[in-house]
């Protein structure tokens, strides 16, 4: 498999964790965000949305980290990313989507660039925007984690799931923007436990060959 990635892309970070957990070897092809390599005609031909990541599996092209991770889970069942029961699957998906659908899109590079460029907001305002949406999203997720994490090591029911794959990159981003994480002790503790695992450690941005 080939993964079109960028070291600091948190959506690519999710897919790197998933590939590592499944023990799938992959080739990383770096597309530098910020230098518009992800908007090149060549990359748009592969992924018309022009977003990172894209995964190519034996010539088939997949986009959207959520879809890619579910595809990897269906094609490589061990270890499972979703619980065996329908209620468990819905709960795990709701936690993953709280990050993927409600936090991440508001703080994506193109949104921040639009705030800074066409809307002419200064750096302090854009940082305040970033921190606001992290705090709003993490407030609900912290309560969900308190309810569902059995042991403080994983988000759901004492077992690794897709929700954990989403948590670690979002906590990484929050730290990068120096968000106050003190109101979210459950999320911070779970993320710390996950970060120590080899599959997460090998996927972290600074461990990537294109890290600068
Ligand atoms: N929902 C997409 C989000 C993909 C996405 O937005 N990726 C970011 C990097 S984390 C990106 O390519 N940003 C480029 C931009 O904002 O111009 C997914 O989960 O794959």
Image (cartoon, helix red, strand yellow):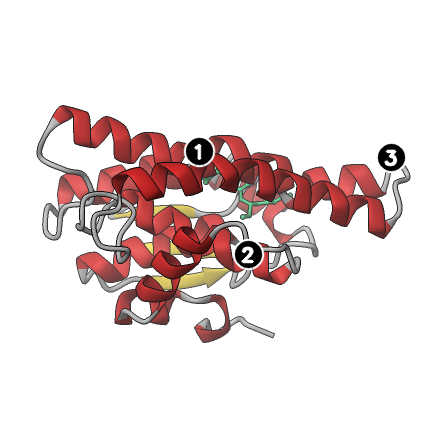
Percent across and percent down for residue 185 are 45, 55
Q: CA distance from mark 1 to mark 2?
A: 19 Å
Q: SS for tag 3?
A: loop
User: Is residue 61 in view from this perspective?
Assistant: no
Of the two numbered discs 2 and 3 in the rendering, the one whose residue sits closer to the viewer: 2
Position of 159 with respect to 147 (left or right) is: left
Q: Which residue is mark 1?
A: 98
Give the position of the C terminus as an image quadrant.
bottom right
Q: Residue at x 44, y 74 (%)?
A: 207
CB of mark 1 within 8 Å of CB of mark 2?
no
Q: SS for tag 1?
A: helix
When the figure is inspected, residue 116 is found, relative to residue 24, above or below; the finding is above
Q: CA distance from mark 1 to mark 3?
A: 28 Å
First along the sequence among labels 1 and 3: 1
Percent across and percent down for residue 188 are 44, 58
> Residue 118 — which label?
3
Q: Residue at x 18, y 31 (%)?
A: 88
Label 2 CA crowd tier, 10 Å (few <14, some 14–19, many 20+): few
Q: Residue at x 73, y 43 (%)?
A: 112
> Residue 182 — which label?
2
Q: Nearer the viewer, residue 42 or 159?
A: 159
Of the two numbered discs 1 and 2 in the rendering, the one whose residue sits closer to the viewer: 2
Quarter, ligand 1: top right
Give the position of the N terminus as an image quadrant.
bottom left
Percent across and percent down for residue 183 are 54, 50
Q: CA distance from mark 2 to mark 3?
A: 34 Å
Position of 164 with respect to 170 (left or right) is: left
CB of mark 2 within 8 Å of CB of mark 3?
no
CB of mark 1 within 8 Å of CB of mark 3?
no
When the figure is inspected, residue 143 is found, relative to residue 55, above or below; the finding is above
């Amino acid at each position: 498999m080939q993964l079109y990635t960028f070291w600091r892309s948190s959506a690519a970070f999710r897919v790197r964790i998933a590939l590592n957990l499944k023990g799938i070897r992959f080739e990383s092809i770096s597309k530098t965000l910020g230098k518009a390599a992800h908007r090149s005609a060549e990359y748009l031909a592969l992924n018309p949305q022009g977003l990172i990541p894209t995964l190519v599996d034996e010539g088939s092209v997949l986009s959207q980290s959520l879809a890619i991770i579910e595809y990897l889970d269906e094609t490589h069942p061990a270890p499972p990313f979703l619980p065996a029961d329908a209620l468990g699957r819905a709960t795990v998906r709701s936690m993953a989507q709280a990050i993927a659908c409600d936090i991440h899109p508001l703080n994506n590079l193109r949104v921040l660039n639009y705030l800074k460029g066409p809307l002419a907001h200064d750096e302090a305002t854009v940082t305040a925007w970033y921190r606001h949406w992290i705090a709003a999203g993490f407030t609900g997720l912290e309560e969900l984690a308190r309810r569902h994490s059995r042991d403080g090591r994983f988000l759901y029911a004492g077992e690794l799931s897709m929700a954990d794959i989403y948590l670690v990159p979002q906590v990484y981003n929050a730290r990068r923007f120096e968000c106050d994480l003190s109101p979210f002790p459950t999320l911070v503790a779970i993320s710390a436990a996950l970060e120590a695992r080899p599959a997460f450690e090998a996927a972290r941005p600074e461990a990537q060959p294109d890290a600068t």
